[in-house]
Image (cartoon, helix red, strand yellow):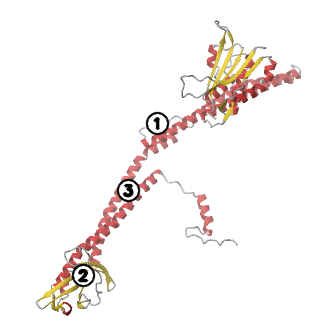
Amino acid sequence: MSAPTPPPLAHQVPPQLERPLLLWHRLWPPAPWSLRRQLLVGILLPVVLSIGFNTVSLYRESLQTLHTAYDRTLLASAKSISEQLDVDGYDEHAQLRSIVPYSALEIFEADNQSRMFYRVSTLDGELVSGFAELPFWRGQIPMRPPYAALVDFYDAKFRDQPVRVAVLLQPVASATGRSMAVIQVAETLELRRTLALHLLADTLWRQALLVLLVVLTVLLVVQRVTRPVRRISQAMAQRPQGDLSPLAPPAAPRELQPLLEATNQVMARLSRLLQHQKRFVRDAAHQLRTPLAVLKTQVQSARRGDMPPAEALAEIETTVDRATQLANQMLALAKVEQLRQAPAPAAPMAWDAIVREVALDLAPLVADKTLDFELQADAAVWVQAPAWMLRELVRNLLHNAIRHAPVGSPLRVQLQPAPQPSSAQDVPSMALLRITDSGPGISAELQQRLFRPFSAGDGHGGSGLGLAICHEIVLALHGHLQLRNRHAPGSDTIHGLDAEVLLPQASL
């Protein structure tokens, strides 16, 4: 049995209005509040609420003050009536008499705005004089009366009008008797409320002027405070397309400095990314133009029959392979540069396994030159790096060594933890990859620019991107790459090249 559907809440939108409201919000979505509007509402709303609360409190306090002042008049009226009382007999046999003309109360009525009524009774509530319909007092005298008399004040209703009543317990004594009289004097509240409203009106005028002054002050202050924001917005809107220079607004407030610094950092990163993109496009256009031109020439020569078809296809295949390798290397270099700008966390990778994998892939090249190849990567070495970056690094360095090594010469690849200096306490442990060949080495001048793209200085057909890719990968992994010529002891003759890579080991 399904549960009954709960009744709709009061704040839920009726079904017949739900679709029109959704359509309205889609066509005219609510605009976000501006900074000035938020400041105005955030400042003025508490001020207006505080002024409203103070106004209500002031009205109540004014009314209480008027009660205190006019209660004294009621007490004076009650005492005036007590002076017109006489008594015969004592205690329960006493007979009270009162001769109180109403004109005795007229002197206490102000401007005919209020009416006064009285009642004189015994302690048992027996009417002696005055208005019989005025209810008899059934209360108690406070422990600490506000005046030096047995008096109590309370609010009541008389003839459907709110009244303020003063009750005086007055001992009455004469030569022939003694008793206690209960004198009640009631006054309507027109005068008190009129005066309180006058005080309230005067207060409201002053509070309205204060609110107006606060509004004008806040408007001026907000206008002045938000001026730097408008200047910055205007300066950015007037910038030419592609201008990513840092923002340097004059006299920017302290609160805007973190935003400006963060904006400048973002613009600097964007500028570097755009520079890399422009450089990639420029280099790609420059470097791919030559193999494409050679490929076009070879195709035209093959179509004319200048060489046998098999030979022409072999040359075309070689040109396509070189262009493909160049494009792949350029894409790898661009990817590494992008990762350097926005590094991403990577899992620990077994570098020794990747070295063995790459060495196995390049084994046909080693066999083609009959090199004396030796691989020492038995120890487990873990580094924090993407697998493709480690594979690209090892492949480029090993391929470069194979290409430059003489036929039949020794080639050694060694991977091991680097020796930790005894003086280094907080230095992280490093892993060392050393590739040693017997090639011609590099000159000092060529060594300074080999890490730059397209700076190949040999005649082996390289594009000049391999070492540049290796350098960018090592920098991205917070490592160090060094190419060092190997000399014979006591001689300047170069016997080969040592390529050494140091990378931080991963903590497992």
Residue 52, position in %: x, y? 37, 64
User: In the rendered image of this protein, does residue 215 appear above or below residue 367?
Assistant: below
Residue drawn 54% across the image and 29% down it: 426
Q: Which residue is mark 3?
A: 215
Residue closest to the far front: 422
Element under disc 2: strand
What amino acid is labelled 2 in the image? Answer: Val
Q: Alpha-carbon neighbours of circle 3 within 10 Å: few (<14), some, or many (≥20)?
A: some
Residue 508, position in %: x, y? 64, 35
Residue drawn 81% across the image and 19% down it: 368
**Residue 238 seen:** no
Badge number at residue 167 = 2
Residue 194, position in %: x, y? 29, 74
For the residues labelled 2 and 1, say whether their Cβ atoms are less than 8 Å apart. no
Relative depth, front residue between 252 and 485: 485
Residue closest to the far left: 175
User: In the rendered image of this protein, does residue 475 appear above or below residue 241?
Assistant: above
Closer mark to the observer between disc 2 and disc 3: 2
- For the N terminus, give its image quadrant: bottom right
Q: Which residue is mark 1?
A: 248
Residue drawn 55% across the image and 68% down it: 11
What amino acid is labelled 1 in the image? Answer: Ala
The residues tagged by marks 2 and 1 sit, at their Cα atoms, a distance apart of 79 Å
Relative depth, front residue between 96 and 314: 96
The residues tagged by marks 1 and 3 sit, at their Cα atoms, a distance apart of 32 Å
**Residue 16 seen:** yes
- Disc nearer the start of the sequence (2/3): 2
Q: Classify residue 228 as left or right of residue 435.
A: left
Q: Classify residue 144 as left or right of residue 25.
A: left
Residue 366, position in %: x, y? 78, 20
User: In the rendered image of this protein, does residue 61 appear above or below residue 382?
Assistant: below
